[in-house]
């Protein structure tokens, strides 16, 4: 036996030393465990940010932003979050500065800067492709479900596109509100069509005008100077003055008139 | 022998379902070890978070058989020690002299008035031990902490420090002897 091993010889004058050293075992702070789980994405925290149509609840973990909801739904947010993602959700101790800044830039007037990361676990590859495509639509502009399906090379998958957008875990941030019915109407939105209209209006679109065009069957605008046709909300279409503006009910009509599709909004 | 023999197999089967258990089982070791190196609770908590995050992504990348065969305690202690040393290099703790200029021990800070005497005494005692330990050379200190504060067997201490068991035993013994000498010198001067 080694005289110097305090564990082997607790009564030989080393007891105080052994107890003193063992007493140095430190209790970890209660914040450690939840913080670790959030960092690896096994739990989430949420903050409230100023959204374009009122306060917005934003849930996040170390992998990215995982869910959003209108600010008024705080009570039910954690419940629905847990039902869908099977992870605990709690209010953040202090707002995560970088993430809040990214969200504010994304929703701000310039919409510049690095996009926040999203945690899209639980979505299919197709769903992620649809969400990525929705992010290509500039603020204040809209495209029909069929456009998304066509862009993804799945022109028949219009209903699947609608379903994928309906399952968007981070509405407002990933702008599924910029996708509209194939007739141009501002159809279905998880948080209500009123919310969708408010979001589009906040981005500078005119929801009433969009509904009016849809009712009249106007699908595209053409310019008789460039002989190009666009979706009505395309930046190129909005530059065309009324005197030079033509209205088309479909791509075939535009093509028959000798117009080619716009390369920016790709209406065909 | 690890204290949680079934855990590696569970982690191999379902990492996300059992990782919380790993944190619960080893947070005291990881945080405690980090604290003895960086000497600041907030820094130690960050080191502990980094350690578990690193462990999670490592486990997520390993084959199931490899995870199932892992010895988690020395593995986590190794990660903790590396990250804590890095942090300490970047931000060394403020110097805390063990003695004042006359060679007398410094008075331990008076406890808050509301603190019950027993708790205060315990707090003072811990502070004394922490101070004594902080005065050891790094190699001895790490060995003493792993062996006698955290209670790891010599084989695991050797694995964590990357040195032969014999060397580690020598370092622990020398560290303990110096602690005892420091303690005795102090007790001679301050009647307890």
Image: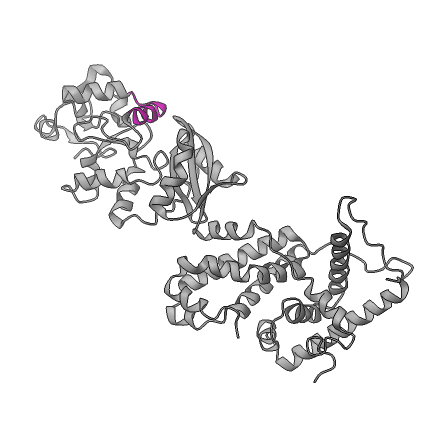
Residue drawn at x 38%, y 34% is A69
Q: Is residue A199 magenta?
A: yes
Task: Estimate the x, y position of residue A81 in percent, counting from the top left.
Answer: 37, 42
**Above or below: residue B38 compared with residue A225:** below
Quarter that holds the C terminus of chain A: top left
- At 54% from the left and 65% from the top, the residue drawn is B76
The N terminus of chain A is located in which quarter?
A: bottom right
- Percent coordinates x, y for residue A220 in the rendering: 18, 26
Q: Position of residue A134 (x, y in %)?
A: 29, 37
A223 drawn magenta: no
Task: Determine whether A30 is above or below A252 in the image.
Answer: below
Q: Specify how the rendered protein is coloured.
A: one colour
- For the point 42% across and 70% down, which residue is it? B68
Whether residue B161 sits left or right of residue A257 in the image: it is right
- The quadrant in which residue B179 appears is bottom right
- The magenta stretch is A194-206
Residue plotted at (54% across, 68% down): B73
User: Does the rendering let one see residue B187?
Assistant: yes
* Residue farthest along the right direction in this orientation: B102
Which of A225 and B45 lies nearest the eye of the viewer? Answer: B45
Residue A110 shows up from this direction: no
The picture places residue B51, in percent across and down from the top left corner, at 54, 59
Residue situated in front as seen by the camera: B13 or B143: B13
């Amino acid at each position: 036996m080694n005289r110097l091993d305090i564990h082997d010889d607790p009564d030989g004058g080393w007891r105080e030393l052994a107890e003193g050293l063992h007493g140095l075992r430190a209790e970890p702070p209660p914040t450690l465990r939840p913080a670790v789980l959030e960092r690896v994405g096994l739990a989430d925290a949420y903050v409230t940010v100023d959204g374009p149509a009122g306060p917005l609840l934003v849930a996040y973990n170390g992998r990215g932003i995982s869910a959003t909801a209108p600010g008024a739904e705080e009570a039910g947010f954690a419940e629905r979050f847990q039902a869908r993602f099977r992870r605990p959700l709690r209010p953040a101790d202090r707002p995560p500065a970088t993430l809040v800044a990214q969200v504010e830039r994304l929703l701000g007037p310039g919409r510049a800067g690095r996009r926040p990361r999203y945690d899209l676990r639980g979505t299919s590859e197709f769903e992620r492709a649809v969400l990525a495509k929705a992010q290509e639509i500039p603020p204040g502009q809209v495209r029909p479900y069929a456009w998304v399906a066509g862009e993804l090379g799945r022109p028949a998958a219009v209903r699947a596109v609608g379903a994928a957008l309906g399952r968007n875990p981070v509405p407002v941030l990933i702008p599924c509100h910029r996708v509209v019915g194939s007739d141009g109407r501002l159809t279905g939105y998880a948080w209500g069509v009123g919310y969708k209209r408010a979001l589009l209006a906040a981005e500078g679109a005119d929801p009433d005008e969009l509904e009016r065009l849809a009712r009249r069957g106007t699908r595209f605008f053409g310019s008789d100077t460039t002989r190009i046709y666009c979706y009505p909300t395309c930046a190129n279409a909005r530059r065309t003055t009324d005197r030079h503006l033509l209205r088309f009910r479909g791509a075939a009509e535009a093509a028959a008139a000798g117009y080619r599709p716009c390369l920016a909004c790709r209406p065909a | 022998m690890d204290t949680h023999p079934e855990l590696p197999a569970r982690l191999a089967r379902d990492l996300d379902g059992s990782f919380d258990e790993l944190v619960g089982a080893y947070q005291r070791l990881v945080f405690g070890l980090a604290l003895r190196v960086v000497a600041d609770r907030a820094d130690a908590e960050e080191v502990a978070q980094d350690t578990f995050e690193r462990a999670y992504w490592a486990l997520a990348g390993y084959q199931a058989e490899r995870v199932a065969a892992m010895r988690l305690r020395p593995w986590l202690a190794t990660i903790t020690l590396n990250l804590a040393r890095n942090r300490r290099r970047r931000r060394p703790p403020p110097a805390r002299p063990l003695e004042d200029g006359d060679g007398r021990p410094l008075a331990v800070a008076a406890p808050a008035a509301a603190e019950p005497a027993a708790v205060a005494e315990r707090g003072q005692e811990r502070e004394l031990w922490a101070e004594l330990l902080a005065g050891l050379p790094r190699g001895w200190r790490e060995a003493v902490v792993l062996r006698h504060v955290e209670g790891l067997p010599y084989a695991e201490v050797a694995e964590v420090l990357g040195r032969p068991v014999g060397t580690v035993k020598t370092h622990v013994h020398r560290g303990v002897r110096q602690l005892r000498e420091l303690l005795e010198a102090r007790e001679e001067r301050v009647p307890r």
